[in-house]
Amino acid sequence: MLKFVSAYLALGYLGFATLVIIGLLQSLAAWREIRGLAWLNYEQSPAWRRALGPGIIVVAYGVFFGTWRDLITPGPAGAELMVLFIGSVALALAITLVGAAILHPYHPPTDQAHLPVGVTARPVILEQGQRGLLLFQGDGQTLPPPGPAVCLLTDPSLPASALYPLAGELARRGMVVLRPNWGSDRQRYPDALSLAPLAMNELGRQPFVDADRLALVGVGLGGDLALRAAAGDHQVCAVVALAPLLDEQCACANLGLLCEMTYPQALHWGLGGRRRQLVRQLDALATLGQLAPRPALVLYGSRDPVASQAAVRARLAAAGAHVEVKLVEGEGHLSLPMSPQAAEITATWLLQHLRGASS
Amino acid sequence: MNPDWALFQALNSLAGRWPAFDWIIRFLMNDYAMTTALSALLVALWFRGRTPEERADDQAAVVHTIVALLVASAIVKGMNLMFFRLRPFTAHDGVHLLFYHPSDSSFPSNSVTVAFCFALGVLQRSRGLGIAGIVFGSLLALSRVIGGVHYPLDVLGGALLAAATVLLVRRYRRWLNPLVRGMRRVASWVLLA
C-alpha cells in the first residue's frame, strides 16, 4: 500500500519532476532534432536550442529546492516516488506533445508555386471517377510531341502539393506526369491495386504520350504500390520508388516519425492501421524479382527515421532484388519527395532509362 | 582504528561548519534531487536513438535497468531482514546529522544502490549519459556520508551490489526478451517506441 506521507510534498514533487522531464524532452528535441517534441524551431534559433531545455530544468530545481522547507523531513519513500515519477513522465510527455503540435506544427507547401515556369497542370478524371492531375511542358494550347510519361503515385498521408517539386521537375524535363489522387476509397487491398492501371490507361490515351516509354514513380506507400504494380504490368519500362516502406515494421507509426512530424500528424500517417496492412498485403519485396530486366531505382533520404539505409539494403539483398539504391543526403522520409536533389536524380535516371526503352 | 569509521569521521567533520556547504550537502543527499536526475537519464536513453535499431537497443537497456533496479531493491530488503547495521548517528555520539533520522539498516545504502543501478544500466548504452549518472551517484554517496546517514562501507556496498545486479541482468538478458518486446509493444500503441 502506497503512503505518500504529505500530499503537499507529493504534489510538489510531481510538479517538479514534470518540469524536469519537460526540460529534458526539450533538450532531446534540440539535440536529436525531434520535431514532434520541439516547442520551437531550434534550427532557426540556436540560442533557444541550447538554453530552453536546460533552463526549464534549472528553474524546476531552483523553485523546488529554493522554496520547499520539508525536503529533509520524511516524505514519500522509494515506491511512492517511483509512482510519482512515472506519473510525471506521462504528464510531461502529454504537455510536450500537445505543446509541440500547437507551437511548432509541420506545414508542407500548400500552393502550386513550386511548379516550374512553363509547366501546365490540368485536372483530369480517370475511369471510375478517380481524380488526378496531369502535368506537362507547354502552355496547354499547343500539344507537345509524343514523349515519355510517368505515373506518379503519392503517399496517402501527403498533401497533393507536396509532390509539386518532383512532378514539376519531371514535367520540366519533358515528361508527361499523371498523379492520380489516392483517396481513402482505395486505401485497402486489393482496391489499391487498381490505381496504377487506371492511371496508365489514362496516360496511354493522351496524344502526347509515347506508350512505349511509360514509367511508374511512387512516394512512400506509393513507392510500395509502384513496385508492386510495375511487377505485374509490362507496359512499365522503369520504376522509381522514393522512400518505400517495404517492410510491415516500417509502417508501424513509431518514435522515429516524431523526428519529422508532430504527434497528431504521426497518428494520421498510420492511416488508422491501414498503412501497415497495405504494406504487408502489397508485399513489394516479394514482387521485386518480377521487375527484371526492367530497371528499378529506390531512393532514400540519409536521415529517414522510418527505415534506416542499412535495413533497407539488407532487405533488398535478402529479397535478391537487382535494384539500384541511391541515398539523398540530409533528407528525411517526408522531405525526400520535396527535395530538389531527389527530383533531379529521379528525372535524370528516368530520362536515361526511358531513352533506352524507346530505341 | 576501523578505517570505515575513520573515513566517516573525516568526511562527517566537514558538516556543520559552513551553512552554504551544509545546504549543498542537503541538496545532494535528499530523496529527490539526484534520484530524479538519475531517473531522467533513463527517460533520455529511451528517446535518444536515431535509428529503429538504435532505439530498440536503447529501450531494451531501459527495461534491463528497471529489472536490475527491482532485483537490487529486493536484495537490499532481504539483506536488511538478515543483517541490521545501526546508522552512524545512532551508534556514535557527536555525529553531525544534516538529514532526518532514517530507521532502516545502514548497510547497504538503498539510495546508492538505486542510483548506481540507474548509472551503470545507462552506461551500457551511452557513455555520456552513463558518466553523468556515475557523477550523480557518486555525489549522492559522498553527501550521504558527509551528512551523517551512512558509513563509507554502506555506500560502497550499495554501489557494488548495483554493479553486480546490472551485470547479472546483462548476463541473463535473453530471458527478458519477452518483457522487452511487451514493453515496446505497449509503447508503440502510443507511438513512443
Image (tube, coloured by chain):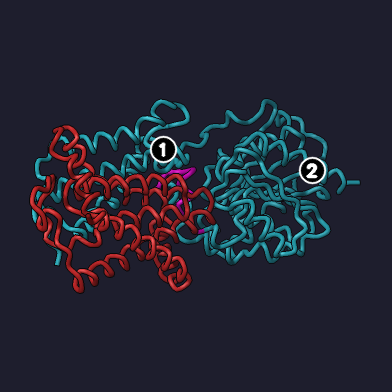
Which quarter shows the C terminus of chain B? bottom left
**Label 1, residues with CA under 10 Å away: few <14, some 14-19, many ≥20:** many
- Range covered by the magenta-colored residues: A252-264
- Same subunit, labels 2 and 1: the answer reads yes
Please give the letter of the chain rendered in cyan. A
Asked which quadrant contains residue B112, the reply is bottom left
What is the x, y in percent for residue A359?
Answer: 91, 46
Which of A73 and B186 lies nearest the eye of the viewer? A73
Asked which quadrant contains residue B18, the reply is top left
Asked which quadrant contains residue A40, the reply is top left
Chain B tint in image: red
What is the x, y in percent for residue B191?
Answer: 42, 55
The residue at the point 13 percent across, 44 percent down is B98
Which amino acid does the dot numbered 1 rest on? Pro
Q: Is residue B185 above or below residue B89?
A: below
Which label sits on residue A148?
A: 2
Q: Is residue B167 above or below residue B97?
A: below
Q: Chain ID for label 1?
A: A
What is the x, y in percent for residue A105?
Answer: 41, 38
Which amino acid does the dot numbered 2 rest on? Pro
Q: Is residue A284 left or right of residue A236?
A: left
What is the x, y in percent for residue A190?
Answer: 59, 66
The residue at the point 40 percent across, 35 percent down is A104
Which of A325 and B26 lies nearest the eye of the viewer? B26
